[in-house]
């Protein structure tokens, strides 16, 4: 009978691999489900709707921080979680950014950059998973995602005094996070050439 360990075997036996059914993976999956009510209440654009949308957005940010905490605290790291966590981030950030670019004043050029970066990272992550191992998230990426979440909240509710200063700070962090992935890509390409 398959167990939680055999359902998601790790290609690297030295790393913890708790399988699929963990608190941290549940939180990552919940974050994706929160996208629907966030967009629904944002589109209502009423005081009550905005309040609920804000609450769901804050809850989504909280799940992003706590899924990693619980994975480490209860030794529930898994390859499935290493994939699900950043994938959930990209779905939520991309979905909200797309909505704000269509219905608010979020810059469309930056939406294109977000989608291009996320698609590239997912594609490289897929190749690394198949050829080497599931890549770990890094801190510049986590900080950039958090900054992105804050900026999306600011744009969603048009908080004018800080909207554009926060946006440009987030742009800088965005490019820092992109740069932080380059050594990984270089190492992967070198290892791939040797194989």
Image (cartoon, rainbow, N blue to C red):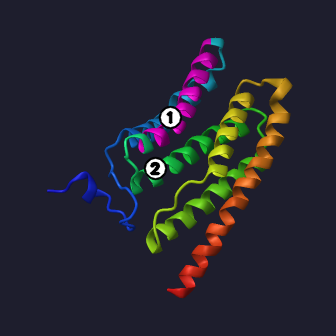
Measuring from the top left, give residue 95's x and y in whole percent: 60, 41
Task: Choose between 42 and 58: the one closer to the eye.
Answer: 58
Vertical arrangement, residue 188 with respect to residue 7, above or below: below
Task: Choose between 48 and 174: the one closer to the eye.
Answer: 174
Q: Please indicate whether residue 140 sits to the left or right of residue 124 in the image.
A: right
Measuring from the top left, give residue 176's x and y in whole percent: 75, 54
Measuring from the top left, give residue 194's x and y in whole percent: 54, 87
- Give the position of the N terminus as an image quadrant: bottom left
Mark 2 lies on residue? 84
Q: Is residue 140 magenta?
A: no
Element at label 2: helix
Q: Please indicate whether residue 66 sits to the left or right of residue 178 in the image.
A: left
Q: Residue at x 40, y 60 (%)?
A: 15
Report how far apart the C-alphas of labels 1 and 2 lie in the structure. 12 Å
Measuring from the top left, give residue 77's x and y in whole percent: 40, 50
Badge number at residue 63: 1
Question: Which of the 4 quarters of the picture holds residue 121?
Answer: bottom right
**Furthest-top residue in view?**
48
Question: Which of the 4 quarters of the picture holds residue 5?
Answer: bottom left
Q: Residue at x 49, y 47 (%)?
A: 85
Q: How crowded is mark 1: few (under 14 residues within 10 Å), some or many (20 or more)?
A: many
Vertical arrangement, residue 124 with respect to residue 156, above or below: below
Q: Please indicate whether residue 151 sits to the left or right of residue 67 in the image.
A: right
Q: Give the range drawn in magenta.
A: 48-71
Magenta residues: mostly which secondary structure?
helix
Task: Choose between 81 and 17: the one closer to the eye.
Answer: 17
Q: How crowded is mark 2: few (under 14 residues within 10 Å), some or many (20 or more)?
A: many
Of labels 1 and 2, earlier in sequence is 1
**Furthest-left residue in view?**
1
Badge number at residue 161: none
Element at label 1: helix
**Furthest-bottom residue in view?**
194
């Amino acid at each position: 009978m398959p167990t939680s360990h055999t359902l998601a075997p790790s290609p690297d036996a030295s790393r913890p691999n708790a399988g699929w059914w963990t608190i941290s993976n549940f939180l990552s999956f919940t974050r994706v489900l929160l996208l629907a009510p966030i967009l629904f209440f944002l589109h209502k654009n009423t005081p009550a709707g905005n309040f609920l949308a804000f609450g769901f957005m804050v809850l989504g940010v909280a799940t992003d921080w706590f899924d990693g905490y619980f994975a480490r605290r209860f030794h529930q790291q898994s390859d499935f979680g290493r994939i699900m966590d950043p994938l959930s981030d990209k779905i939520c950030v991309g979905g909200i950014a797309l909505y704000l670019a269509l219905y608010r004043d979020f810059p469309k050029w930056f939406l294109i950059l977000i989608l291009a970066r996320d698609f590239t990272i997912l594609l490289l992550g897929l190749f690394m998973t198949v050829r080497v191992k599931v890549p770990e998230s890094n801190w510049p990426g986590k900080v950039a995602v958090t900054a992105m979440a804050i900026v999306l909240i600011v744009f969603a509710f048009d908080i004018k005094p800080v909207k554009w200063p926060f946006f440009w700070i987030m742009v800088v962090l965005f490019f820092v996070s992109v740069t932080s992935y380059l050594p990984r890509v270089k190492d992967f390409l070198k290892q791939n050439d040797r194989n």
